[in-house]
Image: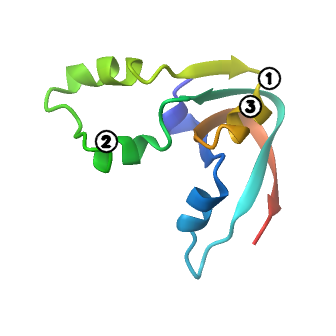
Amino acid sequence: VDYRRRGVICTGSMNVAQGYLTPNSALIEVVPVGSFSICFSPECFDLYGHFQFGGRNLPENLDEVPAELEKLDFIQVIDNGLDVAANSGQEVMVYAEYFSYRVIS
C-alpha cells in the first residue's frame, strides 16, 4: 500500500493533532470501516518532523531515502492493531476504502 498517497495520515497524540488546528478546521477521529491496513513506526513521532526538526535532512540522493526509512522499523498490520498504533502516540497511516468519523472539536 502506498500509504503516503492513498492513506489517511493520523496521529495517536492529541497534542500533535491539536497543533494542526486552525480557526477554520476541526479535530476529528477517524475509524476505518471494513478491511483496513495501518503502518506506523514506534521510532518516529512524525515523519515530516523526523526530517525537518529532528536534526536530519532528506538525503541529497533520493536513492538513500528507503535506507533512512528502513532504520525507522515501520510496522504494517492488516485488519488489526489500530488501538496499539493509536496508543503509541506516533504518526499512523491508515488505508481503507471507507471511514467513519466523529468531530471532536
Q: At 49% across and 30% down in the image, what residue appears?
A: 43
Q: At 47% across and 44% down in the image, what residue appears?
A: 46
Residue at mark 2 to residue at mark 1: CA–CA distance: 28 Å
- Give, as a three-letter code, the residue at label 3: Val
Between residue 60 and residue 46, name the one nearer to us.
46
Q: Position of residue 42 (x, y in %)?
A: 55, 29
Q: Is residue 28 left or right of residue 5?
A: right
Q: Position of residue 18 (x, y in %)?
A: 61, 66
Residue at mark 3 to residue at mark 1: CA–CA distance: 9 Å
Q: Which mark is residue 51?
A: 2
Q: Which mark is residue 65?
A: none
Tag 3 residue? 84
Q: At 76% across and 26% down in the image, what residue appears?
A: 81
Q: State if disc 3 and disc 2 touch (CB < 8 Å).
A: no
Looking at the rendered image, the disc whose residue lies closer to the viewer, 3 or 1, is: 3
Q: Is tag 2's residue or tag 3's residue first in the polypeptide sequence? A: 2
Tag 1 residue? 80
